[in-house]
Amino acid sequence: MARVITVKRIGKASARPDQVVISMSLHMRDNNYDRAMDLAGQHIQRLTETLCAIGFEKNDLKTASFNVHTDYQNVKDRNGKYNRVFNGYVADHSLKLEFDFEMQRLSKALSAIAGCLSNPDLSI
């Protein structure tokens, strides 16, 4: 005989947010590996400087993942055959910034990130 538990109630819970996580992604591409890595470093430095200028610490910006891969494009030649052509090195850097929720601090962070020359993709 199977045991059965039946619950017939509706509950509701709510809580105010107390933590903010801003996730950002930077994507750099270059035909030269060293230049792609230099670009990645420059973008991280700009983003870090931007955040430090509004009161964050250098170590507040954390790397979530970092990946470098080659990119190829399929190009059709005059005989109708497709050939794989090297399209460069791509460096993808995912970062996160976590802090206690304060609407004013969140607003300052989003404004600073939006104005940063690194131009990261972001989500909150």
Image (cartoon, rainbow, N blue to C red):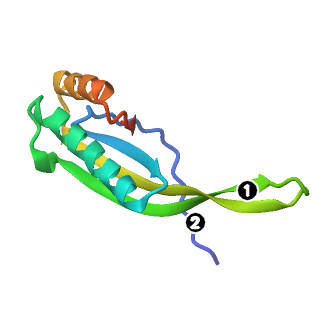
Q: Nearer the viewer, residue 118 or 63?
A: 118
- For marks 1 and 2, give the CA distance: 58 Å
Instruction: For mark 2, give the secondary structure.
Output: loop
Would residue 101 appear left or right of 53 to someone viewing this image? right
Q: Residue at x 11, y 30 (%)?
A: 53
- Where does the image place residue 75, in percent across and percent down from the top left? 75, 53
Give the tally of numbered discs.
2
Q: Nearer the viewer, mark 1 or mark 2?
A: 1
Question: Quadrant location of the C terminus?
Answer: top left
Q: Report the residue marked by disc 2.
A: 4
- Where does the image place residue 98, in percent across and percent down from the top left? 22, 44
Q: Nearer the viewer, residue 80 or 102?
A: 80
Would residue 56 appear left or right of 25 to someone viewing this image? left
Q: Residue at x 42, y 55 (%)?
A: 91
Q: Earlier in the sequence, mark 1 or mark 2?
A: 2
Q: Amino acid at mark 2?
A: Val
Q: Amino acid at mark 1?
A: Asn
